[in-house]
Image (cartoon, rainbow, N blue to C red):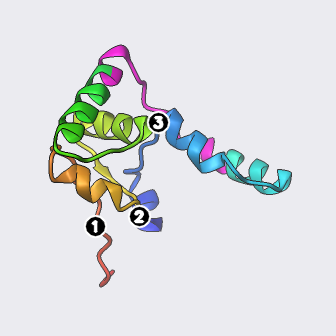
Amino acid sequence: MLKLLGEGVVEIIGPIRQELLSGIKETSAFETLRNRLHVFQDLEIVTADFEEAASCYNRCRSKGIQGSSTDFLICAVAIKHDLAIFTDDQDFLAYKRILPIRLYSIDKNS
């Protein structure tokens, strides 16, 4: 992750910011992370992105794969901007079987 940050190739959307900050019990830890995330501008999300997210949901659901609205919004924005998704959420491996998403692979040799 530090390599990605150093290369300036990290993008974020509001729902990811919200997920990262949700559930942090200590106010000081919340403030620290919130302040660190301020260096990232959110990619703009427009109506077409929500429509594409719904389409992603429908395509996956038709193949028996379920997921969250946020996951499919992440997929839609990643597809639109040709971005690889950095996640340890195994659900994205299932989405990848149906959707034209790329997942960032951590090179264990670096």
Q: Main secondary structure of the magenta part?
A: loop
Is residue 96 shown in magenta? no
First to last magenta residue range: 36-50
Q: Residue furthest top?
A: 47
Mark earlier in primary sequence (2, 3): 3
- Give the amino acid at mark 1: Ser
The number of discs equals 3
- Give the amino acid at mark 3: Ile
- Give the amino acid at mark 2: Asp
Mark earlier in primary sequence (1, 3): 3
Name the spot of residue 67 as percent of width and height, x first. Answer: 36, 44
Q: Which residue is mark 3?
A: 13
Left or right? Give the position of 22 relative to 80. Answer: right
**Residue 63 position (above or below residue 58):** below
Q: Which residue is mark 2?
A: 88
Dot 1 falls on a residue whose secondary structure is: loop
Mark earlier in primary sequence (1, 2): 2
Instruction: Tell me if mark 2 has few (under 14), some (14-19) or many (20+) residues whose alpha carbon lies within 10 angstroms of its own.
Output: few
Left or right? Give the position of 93 relative to 21. Answer: left
Q: Nearer the viewer, mark 1 or mark 2?
A: 2
The alpha-carbon separation of the residues under discs 1 and 2 comes to 10 Å
Q: Is residue 41 visible?
A: no
Q: Which residue is mark 1?
A: 105
Dot 3 falls on a residue whose secondary structure is: loop
Q: Nearer the viewer, mark 2 or mark 3?
A: 2
